[in-house]
Image (cartoon, rainbow, N blue to C red):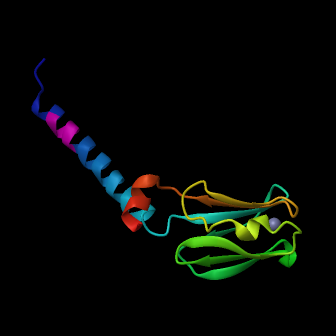
């Protein structure tokens, strides 16, 4: 099989488009891609970026989530067990904090996988 000149041009175009898409994905995905999704009783109450320091009042104030230095942790809760408050801060994809009594779930979601985490850490 012998490739003609126009075949090579076609291949070149495909490589350029694929490479461009890859770079675009890296640049866009690598900027504040991590966020936390807050669910109450199975319903999404909000999504918050981990790149922005803030405190989030969940479920009308029963739980207070703190986002600081790219990590999210439950700093206050009115539940009797206080298990969620004692859980360590989450920042990695799919890590979560669960408050069973209040049916609150905080989960980290990232469009990038471990590669991005390796860069930021
Ligand atoms: Zn709790």
Q: Main secondary structure of the magenta part?
A: helix
Q: Position of residue 76 (x, y in %)?
A: 77, 77
Q: Residue at x 55, y 56 (%)?
A: 93
Q: Residue at x 37, y 63 (%)?
A: 119
Compared with 112, 72 (above or below) is below
Q: Residue at x 63, y 66 (%)?
A: 88
Q: Position of residue 2 (x, y in %)?
A: 10, 21
Left or right relative to 44: residue 50: left
Magenta span covers which residues? 8-12
Please tell me whether residue 117 belongs to the stretch shown in magenta: no
Residue 120, picture quadrant: bottom left
Compared with 42, 32 (above or below) is below
Q: Nearer the viewer, residue 4 or 69?
A: 69
**Numbered label tally:** 0
Left or right relative to 84: residue 24: left
Q: Residue at x 87, y 74 (%)?
A: 78
């Amino acid at each position: 099989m012998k490739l003609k000149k126009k075949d090579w041009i076609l291949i070149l175009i495909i490589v350029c488009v694929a490479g461009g898409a890859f770079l675009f994905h890296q640049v866009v995905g690598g900027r504040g891609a991590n966020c936390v999704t807050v669910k109450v009783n199975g319903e999404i109450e909000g999504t918050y970026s981990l790149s922005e320091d803030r405190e989030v009042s969940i479920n009308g104030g029963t739980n207070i989530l703190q986002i600081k230095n790219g990590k999210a942790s439950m700093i206050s809760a009115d539940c009797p067990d206080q298990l969620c408050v004692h859980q360590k801060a989450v920042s990695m994809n799919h890590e979560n904090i669960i408050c069973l009594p209040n049916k609150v779930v905080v989960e980290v979601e990232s469009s990038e996988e471990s590669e991005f985490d390796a860069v930021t850490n």
